[in-house]
Amino acid sequence: MLNRISDFLRGWRRLSVPPEERSRTFDLMYKNDISFTDEHRLPDGTVTVRLRGKNSTVFCHCADAEAIAYKLGRPHGLPVVCSFLLHRPALVLGALLFAAWMFYSTRIIWDVRIEGADKTDPAEIAALLDELGCGIGDYYPAIDFNALHSRYAAAQQDIAWLSVYMNGTVAEVQVRELYADERIRTAEHTYANVLADADGIVEEVNVREGQACVKPGDLVRRGQVLISGVIEQKDGSIRYEYAAGEVICRTAHPIRTEIRTKRETKAYTGRETSKKSIKFFKKTINLFVNSGTLYTNYDKIDTIEQLCPLGLCELPVWYETTTYREYETVSQDIPADDAAEEAMTGLTEQIRAATQNAELLSKRIDTAFTDGTYRIDCLLYLRRDIGRTGEFPVSDACVPDTGELPENNSR
């Protein structure tokens, strides 16, 4: 084993001599102190040995002087490799850069995996972590994870606890979300009334906090106080509460759908072009020459795919394509029957949205076709909770105004 290592470091060549030259060859090497290793005799009598380093040059000089027939093989070993690389500096530079990149890449984040996010979109968590310096392509030895956890908790309100730890080049993120709590957390000295968000006739009042101001059968107007957070006690003093509850009313909700029989529509010309780019970690490489907008009217379609060789693992490489599809604006005449069907479909969608949190009692529908427009007017009679919270501050020098529903404080 040591002989082979020595041969590789010093370089070696295989010497072959015919049987009739064997004695003269070995006498020549003994006289000139030419060392050799790995002697073999082939079936035809040819003898082969290994000559190390410069011994092959000395042997050739002596053998030529003695007219000894021989055959010398091509050189092997480290000197040959060094000579090969010396004449190809780009190859050496590429190998060094590759080794440096492999060393560096083992210390950057290749992927971010999030577990425990049921209510919060994992993409939102990953985006915020990226803003805080813990995203794909970031150098993780420079990240203070304890400080990262604190900064993340201070920047959002949906996650109760978050922990990031590195598993190789993958950032494993464990999150614990806040428990669902529908009750609004208000500032100190802030209270609320329950106000009507629509006109209606009261059918049922359920008070959780505060004092009811209406009873079943009352007609109420939008903005009227239904449950008051200002409570006058028997001794004449005032107590404030954050009023909460339900006021079920019968209301009328008008909706309208209009469909024109002549309108402008898109007609695609069939021409389209694409711009492609590659995103590697945080670096984007465009594979196109920026030529500006190609068409006057177009639809823009963006697609992105992450590189996943043979479906085995996802790499931090994304292939992005932006497609521009040209269209022209043309006038289209719609038959009255098709307009009526389209209007009815739109009306159905509006009714579904209006009754999502309400009980539909009845509806009245009127249709009309005038001036090229098919119109449907519908009046829905609903049974729903019309109470909305309107907050107000209370201080020693401030008396609450419980009249109207503030637009920016309603929920």
Image (tube, rainbow, N blue to C red):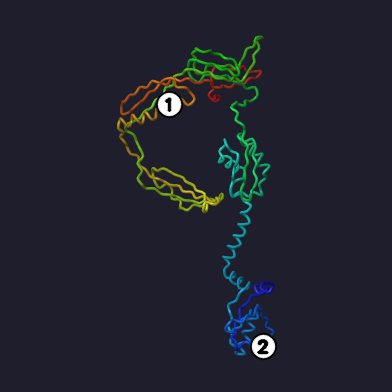
Residue at x 39% of width, y 48% of height: 272
Label disc, if present, on residue 53 of the rendered structure: none
Q: Is residue 375 above or below residue 65?
A: above
For the residue pair 90 and 227, the one nearer the viewer reads as: 227
Q: Residues within 10 Å of mark 2 (few under 14, many from 20)?
A: few
Q: What amino acid does circle 2 point to?
A: Asp
Q: Where residue 168 sits in the image (x, y, percent)? A: 63, 51
Task: Report x, y in % for residue 389.
Answer: 56, 22
User: In which quadrant of the rendered view does residue 25 lie?
Assistant: bottom right
- Which quadrant would residue 40 be assigned to in this image? bottom right
Residue at point 60%, 26% (across, down):
184
Q: Pointer 2: what residue?
A: 27
Quadrant of the rendering where the N terminus is positioned: bottom right
Asked if the residue at tag 1 contacts the one at tag 2, i.e. Cβ–Cβ closer than 8 Å, the answer is no
**Dot placed on the residue nearer the N-terminal end, 2 or 1:** 2
Horizontal side of residue 220 vs 160, given as left or right: left
Q: For the point 57% across and 68% down, which residue is it? A: 88
> Secondary structure beneath disc 2?
helix
> Which of 137/120 is in front?
120
- Residue under circle 1? 351
Q: Residue furthest bottom?
A: 66
Give the Cα distance between marks 2 and 1.
Answer: 111 Å
How many numbered callouts? 2
Say few, some or many: other residues with alpha carbon within 10 Å of mark 1 (under 14 / 14 to 19 / 20 or more). some
The C terminus - image quarter: top right
Q: Please, what secondary structure does the residue beneath circle 1 have?
A: helix
Q: Residue furthest top?
A: 235
159 vs 238, nearest the viewer: 159
Position of residue 308 measured from the top left corner of the image (x, y, whole percent) = 52, 51
Residue 85 is situated, as x and y percent measured from the top left of the image, at 59, 69
Eye-nearest disc, 2 or 1: 2
Q: Amino acid at mark 1?
A: Ile
